[in-house]
Amino acid sequence: MLINQDFSPDRTKYIGGSDIGAILGLSRFRSPLEVWMEKTGKAVKQLDSLPLRFGSFAEEFVASEYARSTGFELLHDESIHIHPEHSFMSAHIDRFVLENGSTPSRILECKTANPFTLFTSSEWGEVGSDEVPMSYLCQCIWYMAITNLDRVDLAVLFGNSDFRIYEITRDRDLEAMVIQKATIFWQEHVLKDIAPPAISESDCHTLFGKGDPSKTVEATSETLELNKRLQLLNDEIEVREEEISSIKQSIMNQMQEAETLTYQGKVLATWKAPKPSFRLDSKRLELDHPEITSNYKVPVQNSRRLVVKAVTN
């Protein structure tokens, strides 16, 4: 493990623990393309937001709760750690755990999570297990590789009343695979400035946002089948939407003027008007004061929209 005293805060020069899950396509919040755009300077990652500020604020509490629960002493080292062989691999460790003396024996990673995910998601396992969201697991693997430590305790505060500790132990085969894929991403995409493949509709809009009216592409047999499948799914959605509308109508007919529908004292549905809101009447403003509105008109480039045509034989 190296501590780079000349470490640049420029995130485009390194892959950090919060990046690796996205690079492997295992993050629900970011794609490999988004990470690539940040590392190549084509997009700037938001470094200040309410969730980020809360996470930083809550880290101190989670760490203190871990220390209280385990009795271990913690080391808050704000240095940036760099892998001795791969200079693009960086780690900012929340805390080091000192079990015996002053030498770190494991890593503490602090997290907060929505308590509802315990019941609606299979990502979280039993306390003490290594069953955690894949992006967090990748982050732990990344940190162990860089620090050469063999365990990460992932301390998680769910809501404000459920504190859990998960235990991630080092798997060198898995670690080697993660480093290999990260190296390919860094060398073949970041350094060569070549975008990774799109893995979502959003990625496609980012990569191919501007269309060329002069271009036409002949579909492959595979794309033809996908087109037919998409048409069938669209038809099913239309049928479901009609069924939903019919069911809503039946419920509304029973409720009539009532705003609440109950069954044995439990609320089943409500039918209320939202609070009144106010908006600018732009059409009237343009009619009454065209000289004002003309000064504030700006062109808007709409996103491309995929329209599927039915194929007839």
Image (cartoon, rainbow, N blue to C red):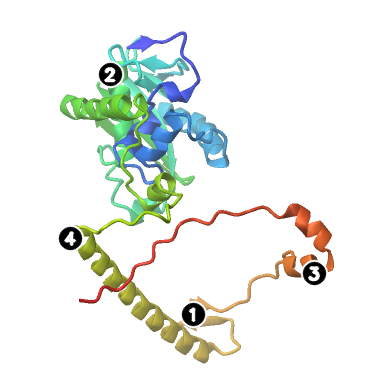
Residue at position x 68%, y 70% in the image: 275
Q: Which badge, 2 or 3, comes first in the chain's sequence?
A: 2
Which mark lies nearer to you, 2 or 3?
A: 3
Residue 181, by quadrant, is top left
- Relative image position of residue 170 (x, y in whole percent): 22, 26
Which mark lies nearer to you, 2 or 4?
A: 4
Question: Which residue was labeled with disc 4?
Answer: 221
Q: Determine crowd level at label 2: few under 14, some 14-19, many 20+ residues with C-alpha closer than 10 A.
A: some
263 versus 58 height, above or below: below
Q: CA distance from mark 1 to mark 3?
A: 53 Å
**Label 3: which secondary element:** helix
267 versus 4 height, above or below: below
Q: Which badge, 1 or 4, comes first in the chain's sequence?
A: 4
137 versus 180 height, above or below: below
Location of the N terminus by quadrant is top left
Q: CA distance from mark 2 to mark 4?
A: 50 Å
Residue 105 visible in rendering: no
Question: Which residue was labeled with disc 2?
Answer: 149
Q: Which badge, 4 or 3, comes first in the chain's sequence?
A: 4
Dot 1 and dot 4 residues touching (CB under 8 Å): no
Residue found at the very far left of the displayed protein:
173
Question: Which residue was labeled with disc 1?
Answer: 265
Q: Determine crowd level at label 1: few under 14, some 14-19, many 20+ residues with C-alpha closer than 10 A.
A: few
Q: Which badge, 1 or 3, comes first in the chain's sequence?
A: 1
Q: Which badge, 2 or 1, comes first in the chain's sequence?
A: 2
Q: CA distance from mark 1 to mark 4?
A: 57 Å
Question: Which residue was labeled with disc 3?
Answer: 287
Residue 72, by quadrant, is top left
Q: Amino acid at mark 4?
A: Ser
Residue at position x 37%, y 46% in the image: 28
Q: CA distance from mark 2 to mark 1?
A: 56 Å
Q: Which badge, 2 or 4, comes first in the chain's sequence?
A: 2
